[in-house]
Image (cartoon, rainbow, N blue to C red):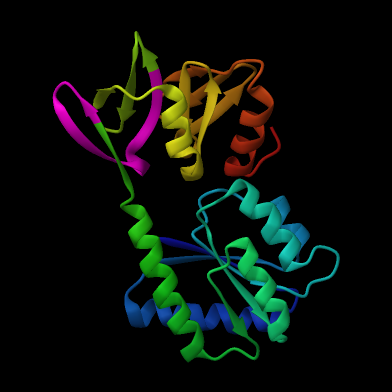
Amino acid sequence: MISIVICDDENNFLDVLEEYMKDYAISKSEEILITRFTSGEELLKNYKLGFDIIFLDISMAEVSGIEAAKYIRDIDKNVIIIFLTSIIKYALAGYTLGASNYILKPITYKKLSLELDKAIKKCKEMEHQYITLKNNDGIFKLYVREIMYIETAQRNTLIHTSDQDVVCFYRMKALEEKLESYGFIRCHSGYIINIRYVKSIEKLLITLINDIEIPISQQKRKDAMKMIAVYLGDEL
């Protein structure tokens, strides 16, 4: 399923956009989950890692689309951002924030359909992102989304996926750098977690969805709490 955010301060425009997306989903046999926000403030308050695509109006009161995109890009390197605007010069500023494209208002179904084709194709490619690892048994290709957590194992590292454990010779620092843009955090000197698998957090302990408990160091607790709160959509 593709999770899409639409954010604009005009409800009538959101109605049209949502209807176009539903028509698109039917015509392309795609599963699409649409989440609506009517202001930049509302979007940031409720933002969660796991959204795939954001259609974001640039000209909104108080928190503009550009300001919202800056905040989102700091915590989510992968989400696809497409700006909505009636003034082209504003859209050009969005490219510095890694925006995929922009759509000029008034929007048409054809234009939206073309942008969704490109964005969804990119999402599906990202689903299959992987890293390669080497150990005494050979070379492994591990899909990023299947990695649950990583821990130190003597002088090596042990990578736990949803269906296997793999020892590798990468140091934790190298793995942290490889995976940080995919929603992984170093919550302890001996652990890296994929925040998509977090079920709960209490004091200095993270529980994953398979009930594995992972410690958080006091030093890393603040940053870990911030990232996990963004993913869970709650203030922790």
Magenta-colored segment: predominant secondary structure: strand
Report x, y in % for residue 77: 54, 51
Residue lying farthest right? 62
Rendered image quadrant of residue 116: bottom left
Q: Is residue 64 visible?
A: yes
Task: Tell me what residue is drawn at x 65 percent, y 69 percent.
Answer: 94
Relative to the observer, which residue lies in front, 142 or 208?
A: 142
Quarter of the image where the N terminus is located: bottom left
Residue lying farthest left? 137
Give above or below for 51 relative to 185.
Answer: below
Report x, y in % for residue 194: 45, 35
Residue lying farthest top? 154
Rendered image quadrant of residue 149: top left
Task: Tell me what residue is drawn at x 59 percent, y 35 percent.
Answer: 228
Task: Tell me what residue is drawn at x 72 percent, y 82 percent.
Answer: 89
Relative to the observer, which residue lies in front, 195 or 98?
A: 98
Count the marks: how many?
0
Q: Is residue 7 visible?
A: no
Quarter of the image where the C terminus is located: top right
Q: Is residue 136 magenta?
A: yes
Q: Which residues are magenta?
A: 134-151
Q: Would you say 131 lies left or right of 182 here?
A: left
Rendered image quadrant of residue 61: bottom right
Q: Would you say 73 lies left or right of 89 here?
A: left
Q: Would you say 160 lies left or right of 203 here?
A: left
Give above or below for 41 relative to 104.
Answer: above
Task: Tell me what residue is drawn at x 34 percent, y 61 percent.
Answer: 124
Q: Is residue 132 magenta?
A: no
Report x, y in % for residue 191: 47, 20
Give above or below for 45 relative to 107.
Answer: above
Report x, y in % for residue 193: 46, 29
